Amino acid sequence: IGQVVSSFNKMVEDLLESKREVEKSNEELRAARDSAEKRRNYIEVLVESLNVGIISLGADGEIVNLNKKAREFLELSPKDPPQKAVTLPSWVTLRDAIADLKKRPQQKKEILLTFRDEAKVVLAELIPLTREGISYPGSILIIEDITDLSRTQRIAAWQEVAQRLAHEIKNPLTPIRLSAQRIRKKLRDNAEDLNEAIYEGTTTIEREVESMMSMVNEFSRFARLPEIHLKSGSIADLVLAAALPYQNAYSKVSFSFNIPDNIPNILFDQEQIERVIKNLFENSIEAMKMSGEIRVSIFEKDKYVVISIKDTGPGIPQEIRTKMFLPYFSTKRKGTGLGLAIVARILEEHGGKIEVDNEYSEGAGLLIYLPR
Ligand SMILES: Nc1ncnc2c1ncn2[C@@H]1O[C@H](COP(=O)(O)OP(=O)(O)OP(=O)(O)O)[C@@H](O)[C@H]1O
Ligand SMILES: [Mg+2]
């Protein structure tokens, strides 16, 4: 009987042991489930609170789930099942974008979602579900609202247009005013060359007004910076014509030209290069306080035709030589600092450039390079 008792005891012991084991693994299971649950909750909260739209797509591109932001994008109410999204008008646009993104993975696509009373610019990105080399069927579509951002960019672009317009309208005004003043003076003095002054003055005024008109037209027609219209022509003729109103207007500024006859015709935008030259003349005349010399020469160098403009003013301090071409850099009380920035931009669009002539030291020297 002792044997029976002891084997019974052992059996009870074993049973208790296995019950403990079962309980233990139950507990482990529960803990694992709890932590999985916690993680799931965490991810859900995270995904829901993100400020980008997230749409998870199944293997066949069907919508499995979407977060709060994505519902907002699609105008899907919180109670609607995810599948309802495919019936919404905005889904068509998104579906096309997804098809596009599938062909070009790892790329983002800017799309326009239009709703009844507004339009949104969104950036869409498709991410296939893979982790550590294992890929799962389906993918995630991330959509980000960049409406405000692109609006800011557009505003910035507009500001540039407006600023350049303002600056370049200011430019032709100077020769116009100078021409008028000159005619009046000749008239008052009853000068012998009055007729000549009237002829030259009105020619200048007409030219400047025409240039201003075509500029304004271009700005307002396309709402962007003027495009360059390349035409073959003589850069020498252009430089001489650009200098004329200044020569007539400033009696204490003398111009000298060193232009060989054999400079080839090159391609350039007449009006824009004229503005380049005039910007430089204005800077020189201002720097020389309306009195001094401007020396213009044209020569060929490597693949460029170079226009050199030197003045006899105070020169350009070493420390501003790299900054002076940046927008808004000015040492003048009333300067906008846009003159040389516009010049640099126009030349860049021509495939040319502008540099300070570091070998010249009697004043400021600038070199304009235009491809030939
Ligand atoms: N010929 C020059 N001699 C000396 N300094 C110059 C000369 N040309 C340009 N600079 C310097 O470069 C700066 C920038 O010139 P930029 O034409 O861009 O602007 P700005 O002339 O000051 O303003 P805005 O063109 O609107 O009148 C000038 O403020 C001046 O300090
Ligand atoms: Mg200037």
Image (tube, rainbow, N blue to C red):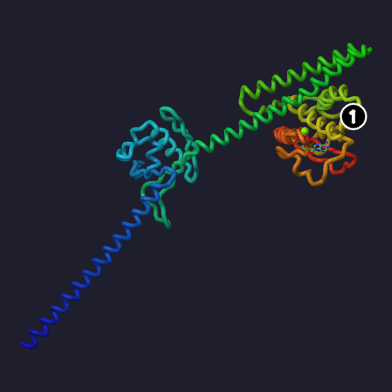
Q: Secondary structure at mark 1?
A: strand
Picture quarter with the N terminus = bottom left
Looking at the image, residue 310 sits to the left or right of residue 88; the answer is right
Tell me if residue 350 can be seen. no
Q: Which residue is mark 1?
A: 257
Looking at the image, residue 362 sits to the left or right of residue 42; the answer is right
Residue 59 placement: quadrant:
top left
Above/below status of 57 relative to 134: above
Tell me if residue 213 can be seen. yes
Above/below status of 187 relative to 52: above
**Residue 203 percent location from the top left of the image:** 81, 15
**Residue 302 percent location from the top left of the image:** 81, 39
Amino acid type at image mark 1:
Phe
Q: Nearer the viewer, residue 205 or 241?
A: 205
Above/below status of 319 relative to 112: below
Badge 1 density bin: few <14, some 14–19, many ≥20, Cα 10 Å: some
Q: Residue furthest bottom?
A: 2
